[in-house]
């Protein structure tokens, strides 16, 4: 058993493992720095003229107008311009609101409203089956 500690290659492998663990620990400490980002430029591309898209844009801009804001929105007219801005360092990220955003939001809202109504009607049928049968009878009658 003590022969294990007398072997040179075991000590070298333990030393290499300790050095690697130390390097990774040091790298983790550096990654957790407390640098505060302020006025980070992000591109904002709006391809939808709907009410919901305008509401989202207004909320994004309103929050970024604070004194210590972390984000500075840069207006970009088209998504084709994004690659040029990324390459030149004008901005470091982008939020793109595609055309049809408002329509998709409204469809999703209508779908969720329908689901809620269905769940409430199902719960009503379970609680009062007689009332549900009467409602079905009244719907069939023109």
Image (cartoon, grey):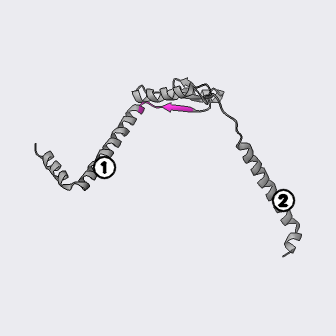
Residue 96 covered by magenta stretch? yes
Q: From mark 1 to mark 2, how far is it between C-alphas?
A: 64 Å
Q: Which residue is denoted by mark 2 in the rendering? A: 15
Segment colored magenta: 94-101
Q: Quadrant of the C terminus?
A: top left
Q: Is residue 125 left or right of residue 115?
A: left
Residue found at the very far left of the displayed protein: 142
Percent x, y of residue 8: 88, 66
Label drawn at residue 40:
none
Percent x, y of residue 114: 31, 43
Percent x, y of residue 138: 13, 46
The structure residue drawn at horizontal position 79% and vertical position 52%, both measured from the top left corner, is 22
In this view, 142 is above or below 5? above
Q: Dot 1: within a 10 Å radius of its alpha carbon, few (fewer than 14), some, or many (20 or more) residues?
A: few
Residue 78 covered by magenta stretch? no
Instruction: Name the N-terminal-most of marks 1 and 2.
Output: 2
In this view, 48 is above or below 27? above
The structure residue drawn at horizontal position 75% and vertical position 51%, both measured from the top left corner, is 25
The structure residue drawn at horizontal position 86% and vertical position 64%, both measured from the top left corner, is 11
Q: Is residue 114 left or right of residue 61?
A: left
Q: Which of the 4 quarters of the picture holds residue 89? A: top right
Q: Dot 2: within a 10 Å radius of its alpha carbon, few (fewer than 14), some, or many (20 or more) residues?
A: few
Q: Is residue 102 left or right of residue 59?
A: left
């Amino acid at each position: 058993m003590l022969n294990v500690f007398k072997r040179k290659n075991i000590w070298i492998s333990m030393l290499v493992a300790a050095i690697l663990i130390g390097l990774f620990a040091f790298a983790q400490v550096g990654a957790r720095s407390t640098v505060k980002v302020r006025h980070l430029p992000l591109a904002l591309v709006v391809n939808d003229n709907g009410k919901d898209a305008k509401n989202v844009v207004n909320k994004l801009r309103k929050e970024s107008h604070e004194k210590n804001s972390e984000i500075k929105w840069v207006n970009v007219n088209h998504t084709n311009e994004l690659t040029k801005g990324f390459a030149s360092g004008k901005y470091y990220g982008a939020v793109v609101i595609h055309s049809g955003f408002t329509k998709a939001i409204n469809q999703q809202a209508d779908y969720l409203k329908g689901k809620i109504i269905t769940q409430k009607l199902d719960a009503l049928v379970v609680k009062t089956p007689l009332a549900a049968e009467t409602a079905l009878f009244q719907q069939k009658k023109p």
